[in-house]
Image: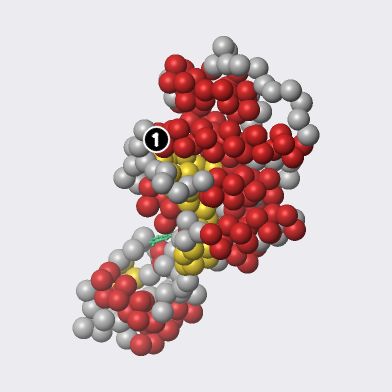
């Protein structure tokens, strides 16, 4: 599943809320970085590393099976956690080596998921390297009948991968459930304020909120949202002393 939207639209928060009820070991996060120098597969390295570090050795080695050496290419700690793992395969041409790696990661995730629902969250995919996106597309094709959910978030406005990455992203978007977070409408804002302060806001207040927040429920300016009541002011969200104080009518 892919969640897209503008910066601050609430993509990460939605993903966090979606997995909040799951046991810690059943959710694996990978966060893409804008920083230069991040290694290829960085979000996947985080996902795998988190699991490899926290899973008891015996179980981990059983789950890795014959693919331990492949996974060690991404997370070298596999070698110390599973020292008796079989050595890697002979040198392969790059395409074959990549296929073997993708298959090993996919099989590993499916093995983990066979014990119960597993959610992999890949945040900020607009910064992902193209190899990571190719691996994601590979994994996505194997998800049928698995208790494995991959949740990806991205800013649609900031996709600037290589051509291969863009193609992988296109395939991925077509094959996934996609959710685009958009701003709140005037009606949404009215309902939100009604729920927050128990009174319907005046139309000009709604317009002022829309202008200030651009319709994002996550806009920092909501923190300054407060409601005038006669001579006093009640603050309904995060207390703030800023100037933004729309009026509510009874
Ligand atoms: N529905 C919501 N209700 C209240 N706060 C929210 C909601 N959605 C998001 N927020 C808050 O708004 C802020 C921005 O949200 P979030 O980080 O999820 O945005 P984002 O879409 O992931 O942005 P970016 O593209 O920069 O990663 C966070 O502090 C988050 O907790
Ligand atoms: Mg985010």
Q: Nearer the viewer, residue 113 or 40?
A: 113
Expressed as whole percent of the image width and height from the top left, the position of residue 169 reads 63, 58
Locate residue 102 relative to residue 163 in the image: left or right: left
Q: Residue at x 35, y 87 (%)?
A: 203
In the displayed orientation, state which residue is furthest to the top: 84
Quadrant of the rendering where the C terminus is positioned: bottom left
Instruction: Determine the secondary structure under disc 1.
Output: loop
Query: What residue is pinned by disc 1?
Result: 114
Question: Could you tell me if residue 121 is visible in this image?
Answer: no
Rendered view: 147 above or below 227? above
Q: Nearer the viewer, residue 84 or 122?
A: 84
Q: Residue at x 64, y 31 (%)?
A: 74
Question: Hey, which quadrant is residue 6 in on the image?
Answer: bottom right
Colouring used for the render: secondary structure
Question: Hey, which quadrant is residue 237 in on the image?
Answer: bottom left
Question: Could you tell me if residue 104 is visible in this image?
Answer: yes
Q: Nearer the viewer, residue 192 or 244?
A: 192
Question: Hey, which quadrant is residue 209 in on the image?
Answer: bottom left
């Amino acid at each position: 599943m892919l969640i897209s939207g503008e910066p601050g639209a609430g993509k990460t928060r939605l993903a966090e809320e979606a997995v909040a009820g799951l046991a810690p070991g059943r959710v694996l996060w990978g966060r893409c970085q804008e920083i230069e120098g991040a290694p290829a597969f960085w979000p996947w390295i985080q996902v795998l590393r988190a699991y490899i570090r926290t899973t008891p050795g015996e179980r981990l080695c059983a789950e890795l099976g014959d693919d331990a050496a492949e996974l060690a290419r991404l997370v070298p700690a596999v070698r110390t956690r599973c020292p008796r793992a079989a050595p890697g395969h002979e040198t392969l041409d790059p395409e074959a080596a990549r296929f073997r790696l993708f298959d090993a990661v996919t099989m590993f995730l499916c093995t983990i998921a066979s014990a119960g629902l597993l959610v992999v969250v890949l945040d900020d995919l607009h910064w992902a390297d193209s190899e990571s996106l190719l691996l994601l597309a590979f994994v996505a094709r194997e998800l049928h009948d698995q208790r494995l959910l991959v949740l990806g978030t991205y800013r649609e406005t900031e996709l600037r991968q290589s051509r291969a990455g863009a193609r992988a992203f296109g395939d991925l978007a077509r094959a996934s459930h996609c959710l685009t977070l958009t701003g709140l409408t005037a009606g949404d804002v009215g309902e939100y304020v009604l729920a927050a302060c128990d009174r319907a806001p005046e139309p000009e207040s709604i317009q002022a909120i829309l202008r200030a927040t651009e319709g994002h429920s996550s806009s920092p300016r909501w923190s300054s949202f407060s409601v005038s009541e006669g001579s006093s002011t009640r603050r309904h969200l995060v207390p703030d002393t800023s100037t933004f104080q729309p009026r509510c009518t009874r």
